[in-house]
Amino acid sequence: MTDNKPCPFCGSKEVAFTRLDYPAVMCLACGARGEVNHDKYCAEILWNRRPTEKAIEDKVTKLKDYLGRIQITMNYSTSAIAYDKDFQSVMAIIREARDDEELK
């Protein structure tokens, strides 16, 4: 067994490859499961492939900044948000996060 990262939900280090409902790495403390993969080695790679905390914090900070700008814009005019450049920026960040290989 490789050294798996702790569970991202509860922090437990008790994680193992299991074939209960479906084959995947599973947290033995809270039941969180990684992506399905019949190969133990691949399942462990999928479990351990996560972005760093710093990368996540940077994206959250950027999103909060843009959302704050949108709220200010909404206070002035609710119809202006559809054309607001900041709104388009937030949508671009959301699409980037969704498509980002590290977050899959």
Image: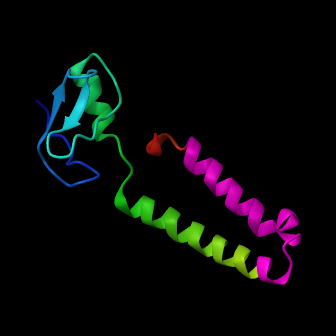
Does 87 appear above or below 10? below
How many discs appear? 0
Residue 35: percent from left, percent from top: 35, 30
Does 26 appear above or below 40? below
Which residue is depicted at the point 27% across and 41% down? Answer: 32
Horizontal side of 15 relative to 54 (left or right) equals left
Which residue is depicted at the point 65% across and 77% down? Answer: 68
Give the main secondary structure, helix, strand or loop, of the magenta stretch: helix
Point out the stretch of residues depicted in magenta.
73-99
Q: Which sits in the foreground, 18 or 44?
A: 18
Q: Is residue 91 magenta?
A: yes
Which residue is depicted at the point 26% across and 21% down? Answer: 23
Horizontal side of 34 relative to 4 (left or right) equals right
Identity of the residue furthest to the top in this view: 38
Residue 65, picture quadrant: bottom right
Does 54 appear above or below 7? below
Residue 72: percent from left, percent from top: 74, 82
Q: Which sits in the foreground, 33 or 50?
A: 33
Q: Which sits in the foreground, 97 or 76?
A: 76
Horizontal side of 8 relative to 94 (left or right) equals left
Residue 16: percent from left, percent from top: 15, 33
Residue 79, picture quadrant: bottom right
Residue 10: percent from left, percent from top: 22, 54
Q: Quadrant of the N terminus?
A: top left
Q: Is residue 37 magenta?
A: no
